[in-house]
Image (tube, rainbow, N blue to C red):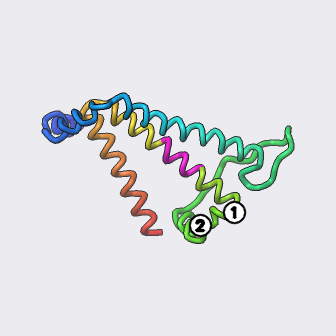
Amino acid sequence: MIALAVVAHRWPLLAEVQQAIDRHKAVKIGVAVMTGLSGLAFIGGGLYAMATGVANGSEKTPGTPAASFQVELSMHEIKDAWHARRWATDPRWRFMFFMMTTGFLMATGLLATIFVLGDVFAKLLTALMFLYAFVRTVWAFAQA
């Protein structure tokens, strides 16, 4: 980790990236924060939809207990549902893809905020984390 910090502060390319990001920084911060907040707002709406039964297509009457929030899906199931366009016809899958999208928005907003606000080391570490998550996700879908 220390070696990564030393490399980050001495690499000229990263200094140029830092200067490029510092231009119009307020706009970039706004976009990053709004991406994360929109994901948070959508998750709130999704949880409300699940609690009221809208997520699975059955409206609940007020006062009935909320649905369970525990769901397990494999990458294979997600890939099959996407290719079969189940998200367009099945309310359960529509809700699942909606929640996955909101999670992606929240994670992207958080990493983008850290990337914009952080120093060179934080930018490098955040970029590596995002790249790792992206590669692992693509790899998992390819293997499914």
User: Above or below — where is 55 with respect to 48?
Assistant: below
Residue at 49% in and 44% down: 105
Can see residue 3?
Answer: no
Q: Is residue 105 magenta?
A: yes
Q: Which span of residues is magenta-colored?
A: 99-106
Give the left or right position of residue 10, taking residue 38 as reference: left
Can see residue 62?
Answer: yes
Image quadrant in which you'd find residue 87: bottom right
Residue at 37% in and 28% down: 26
Q: Is residue 103 magenta?
A: yes
Residue pointed to by mark 2: 81
Residue at 46% in and 42% down: 107
Residue pointed to by mark 1: 90
> What amino acid is at disc 1?
Asp
User: Above or below — where is 106 with respect to 29?
Assistant: below
Give the left or right position of residue 84, taking residue 138 as reference: right
User: What is the secondary structure assignment of the residue under circle 1?
Assistant: loop
Answer whether labels 2 and 1 touch (C-beta < 8 Å): yes
Image spot of residue 6 (x, y percent)? 16, 35
Crowdedness near tag 2: few (<14), some (14–19) or many (≥20) residues, C-alpha within 10 Å: some
Task: Return the disc, 2 or 1, that comes first in the chain's sequence.
Answer: 2
Q: Report the Cα–Cα distance between label 2 and label 1.
A: 10 Å
> What amino acid is at disc 2?
Ala
Crowdedness near tag 1: few (<14), some (14–19) or many (≥20) residues, C-alpha within 10 Å: some
Q: Main secondary structure of the magenta part?
A: helix
Image quadrant in which you'd find residue 41: top right
Image spot of residue 53 (x, y percent)? 77, 49
